[in-house]
Amino acid sequence: MAAFSDYRRRNLFVLGGVTLLVVALAGVALTQRSQQMGPSFEPQPVIPGLTDTINNIGEVTVETRDTLFHARRTDEGTWVIPERSNFPANVQMVRAASVGMSELQALEPRTAQPELLGRLGLVAPADGGDAVRVVLSDRAGETLGDLLIGHPQGVSDPEGLNRFYVRRNGEDQSWLARGSMVASPDITAWLDKNIVAIDRERIRSTTFTLPGEPSFTVARADETEMEYTLTEIPPGREMSYPGVAYVPATVIANFTFDDALPVNEVDFTNAAEIVTETFDGLRIIVHVAPVGDAHWASLAAESDGAQEQQDEAAQINISAHAWAFLLPEFTAQTFLSTRESLLAPPAE
């Protein structure tokens, strides 16, 4: 019986070894077959050769079904938006579109069937599609890159890069691409919003003069004081609550805008005037005028302080003097704060 048991045990060991060998060989075969049948596409630039000509770019064109605008480099090397009377362009957006396109990598091919491109958001604007078309041209008008951008795919990867569908304009082949390219179809995102940069800590006072309203000033004694208060409080009245004047007093520190026009296209004849002064001698004068349901602002600056503040005022005037700025509604209403809005209701 012992010999029989040993015989059975040897057979089981042999059978187990053969089974493991078969499984291993099958795994190797499957792996080799998968490698042979799997995609052999290697990532490659979406626009070959663009990195070699990136410094020659003179214009970026953005086209959607509803919009068409350009960012154009001037002879002086600055960037402007022709559709906004050559308002300065956001150079970060220009870079995100141009350099972003040059670095864009095609990860794998997708459909080349025209009837399926709509599923990827890659029907051209000229054909009524949802794609965003971005064209890079040199100063002579020669096209360096012409790309249609479709739907995003997934979220940003750990490197901060995105995946989205693209195709070169004029070609049916689409691609899943990866990169940092950004080309907003909103023209206002291409406007340079860096007009005024004032730290709140510098602001000493702000004076509001609104048509039909009493003029008033909110101020603080020194830079260590956090709370702004009315310099003249009507008899029997008091501030609504501590800190109520902080946002109106420092509204210029948050200055932003939604759009821009040449200043002579807006009537500022009866505009409100808001003057902010800093502890170091800078004054910023804002005029706010209603146009329909919107509010537009003009800006100017002056200083009797040190040379640094005089230079700062001059730079603000260079950036702002020719323009009117469409204010976001909250910003407009803050500029138009009344004295009454800062006071508690009168005691009965």
Image (cartoon, rainbow, N blue to C red):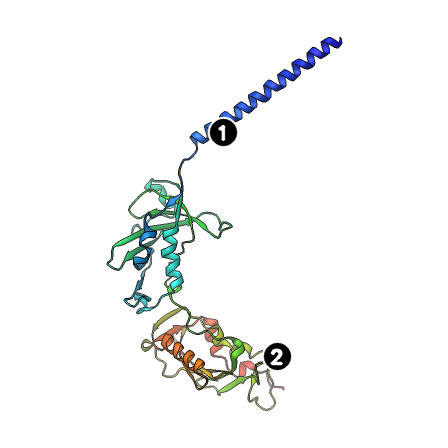
Name the residue beneath numbered marker 2.
Answer: 242
Give the mark nearer the N terminus: 1 vs 2: 1
Coordinates of residue 315 in the picture (x, y in percent): 39, 77
Against 344, residue 80 (above or below) is above
Element marked by disc 1: helix
Q: Nearer the viewer, residue 55 or 124?
A: 55
Expressed as whole percent of the image width and height from the top left, the position of residue 61 reads 31, 58
Name the image quarter holding the N terminus: top right
Q: Does dot 2 land on a helix, a strand or a loop?
A: loop
Q: Which residue is mark 1?
A: 31
Residue positioned 45% across, 47% down in the render: 153
Q: Residue 16 at x, y = what percent?
A: 63, 19
Image side of residue 155 versus residue 166, left or right: right
> In which quadrant of the rendered view does residue 113 lie?
top left
Q: From the viewer's perspective, is the residue at label 1 or at label 2 nearer?
A: 1
Q: CA distance from mark 1 to mark 2?
A: 72 Å
104 in relation to 108, above or below: below
Rendered image quadrant of residue 37: top left
